[in-house]
Amino acid sequence: MPPVIAIDGPSASGKGTIAEAVAQRLGFHYLDSGALYRIVGLVGRECGANLDNDLEISNISLNLKIKFDSGRVWIDGRDVSVQIRGEIAGAAASRVAALPGVRRALMTLQHSFRQPPGLVADGRDMGSVVFPDARLKIYLTATPEERARRRYKQLMEKDSGASMAALLQDIRDRDLRDSTRAAAPLLKCADAVEIDTTGMPVEDVVARVLHLYQKLQKTQ
Ligand code: C5P
């Protein structure tokens, strides 16, 4: 089986940026599992479904035609790359992600990303549930304040009128929901290496992950 590097952690901990950079450096494929939950949340809202109804949302998840290409995301031929990044899709994602049937429905799709020469996957349960045999498991954290600052900066670049206080509250709410849900809660696996990225430049975090992976390769 091609090797997997699993990168888990709370919202806005920098998982996507780090995972994408590590995948690029190693020439590996990249899975942004959060994008799948965001897509399901978005489509569920658009068709007026009850976002807490497992059966209804699982059926939507099973029937989606999702395409990832060059950093963009399409559902049924429609480019939703920008829409799924918004706070509305994020909040909907966090709701549908609590449904066990939806998590099961997305499993096969996530496994299909495991292709040679390897995969870097980011999310909440990559190391614990989806790829428990991952060669390297990383748990990225940062303080809620630092994560709210990062998200604020990102949103300002897009000219959005977000407030720091609202973003910090949203991050705290999402942390609580993600870590207390019954289905695949956000947790640090016993065999994951924790990296606190507060105040750390992106390049240093990427170098640390690559170093850990190369060290493991030498011992295999
Ligand atoms: O990582 P991102 O913020 O894009 O994820 C959106 C939401 O999807 C998270 O708040 C979380 O509830 C959910 N998620 C999950 N499991 C994953 C990835 C994301 O439950 N593997």
Image: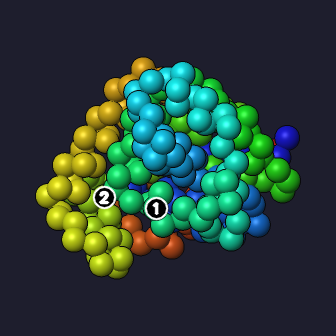
Residue farthest to the front, as pictured: 47
Residue 152 falls in image quadrant: bottom left
Quadrant of the rendering where the C terminus is positioned: top right
Asked which secondary structure carries label 2, the reply is helix
Whether residue 4 sits left or right of residue 116 in the image: it is left
Going by the image, does 64 lie left or right of 43? right
The spot of residue 34 in percent (x, y) is 52, 48
Inspect the image, locate mark 2, and give the three-letter code of the amino acid beneath it.
Arg
Viewer-nearest residue: 81 or 140:
81
Which quadrant is home to the N terminus?
top right
- Ligand 1 within 8 angstroms of badge 1 C-beta: no
Q: CA distance from mark 2 to mark 1?
A: 21 Å
Please tell me in which quadrant of the rendered image residue 164 appears.
Answer: bottom left
Q: Which mark is residue 83?
A: 1
Q: Residues within 10 Å of mark 2 (few under 14, many from 20)?
A: many
In the rendered image, which residue does mark 2 sit on?
Answer: 147
Residue 2, x across and y down, in percent: 82, 46
Of callouts 2 and 1, the N-terminal one: 1
- On the picture, is 200 further left or further right than 26? left
Label 2 lies in ligand 1 vicinity (Cβ under 8 Å): no
Going 50% across and 23% down the picture, which residue do you hit? 54
